[in-house]
Image: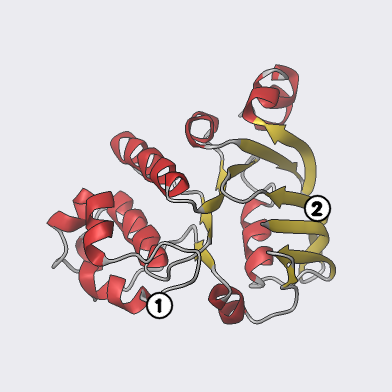
Amino acid sequence: MLEVNHINSFYGKAHVLRDLSLDVPRGKVVALLGRNGAGKSTTMKSIMQLVRPQSGSVMFQGQQITGLLPHKVAKMGIGYVPEDRRIFTDLTVSENLVVGQQPPREGAVTWTEDMLFDLFPNLAERRNNRGKALSGGEQQMLTIARTLMGNPLFVLLDEPSEGVAPVIVEQMARVIQQLKSEGLTVLLSEQNLHFAQAVADMAVIIESGERAFHGTLAELNAQPEVRDAFLAA
């Protein structure tokens, strides 16, 4: 569904992604793993064209999206959940969901508030609360729910388990498994290997902006020397 081919991305003169390639098959969950600062978030932003690769290409469902404006990438069916959440703190949970609502999309689940409240019971209990009254984990849930209101075919999740309570991490894992069962394709960036192992089919490890591993979780687990070299604290 998604192909990233030899992209090079920069912040000013800082060369962050170096000839990076990866692919995400339709209907799969792929974990983008690596230490803090490895380039995971930049990879997500490069796919969304928030950071435009200076070379290489990004293909979505066989179409070139490199160089498009980010809102046009979103309209093609890519949902993006940023690491810093960016909810509307002065709007209620329900109002945040309405802001994210998009028309039905062929081949995608058409999400409703009721469906999302079933998926995120914590949000159902707080549907009339303003965003600023939610915990960090609840804000993360709201960001994911608001993204789903756009009826995406493919979802980018940037560090969904970071900085949230263990009980919320368990709920996040169940949510991602449910999204996969609904047919969504997911690329998630993570430092938490245990979380990734609970939800992902495949893994890509990046180190200093370069790909160090690309394979199944079973293949990664069979290579502890790779895991220890690139993921150990």
Q: Which mark is residue 59?
A: none
Where residue 192 appears, as percent x and y from the top left, is: 52, 35
Is 99 left, or right, of 125 in this rendering?
right
Q: Is residue 5 above or below residue 11?
A: above
**Amino acid bearing label 1:** Gln
Is 65 left, or right, of 82 in this rendering?
right
Q: In front of the other: label 1 or label 2?
A: 1
Towards the viewer: 23 or 86 = 23
Is 76 left, or right, of 46 in this rendering?
left
Q: How many marks?
A: 2
Q: Is residue 83 above or below residue 228?
A: below
Classify residue 17 by image quadrant: bottom right
Element class at badge 2: strand
Q: Is residue 129 above or below residue 117?
A: below
Is 139 left, or right, of 221 in this rendering?
left
Q: Which residue is mark 2?
A: 20
Q: Which residue is mark 1?
A: 102
Image quadrant where one finds the C terminus: top right
Where residue 22 appears, as percent x and y from the top left, is: 75, 49
Classify residue 59 by image quadrant: bottom right
Towards the viewer: 76 or 68 = 76
